[in-house]
Amino acid sequence: MASDVRKEQLDRALALKPDIASLSAGSNDAVRGVPLRTIRRELRFIAGALAEVSSLVLMTGVGDMGSI
């Protein structure tokens, strides 16, 4: 869940001050019916925080969720 990434992993990632950060989150939220606006808010928060310490934030998806 994107909210778990924010609460449990983001601070550790920010402390590393990575040159490049990869963000792949949100698919579990979608499968569990979390409202899209909530997923979007969480991902924007995480990506924004990473962008403050990283020169590049790569957001990746998991493919077609309709095929799951």
Image (spheres, grey):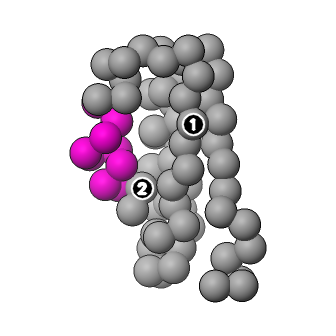
- The residue nearer to you, when weighing 45 against 10, is 10
Please provide the residue range marked out in magenta: 3-11
Q: Is residue 35 visible?
A: no
Q: Main secondary structure of the magenta part?
A: helix
Mark 2 neighbour class, 10 Å CA radius: few under 14, some 14 to 19, many 20 or more? many
Against 33, residue 9 (above or below) is above
For the point 45% across and 50% down, the residue is 42
Does 4 appear in magenta? Answer: yes
Q: Is residue 18 left or right of residue 56?
A: left
Residue 2 shows which numbered tag? 2
29 in magenta:
no
Give percent across and percent down for residue 11: 29, 30
Quarter of the image for residue 51 reads: top right
Which residue is painted at 35% across and 55% down in the image?
A: 3
The answer to whether residue 64 is above or below residue 2 is below
Helix, strand or loop under label 1 = strand
Q: Is residue 20 above or below residue 66?
A: above
Label 2 or label 1, whichever lies nearer to me, is 1
Q: How far apart, in angstroms, are the residues tagged by discs 2 and 1?
A: 13 Å
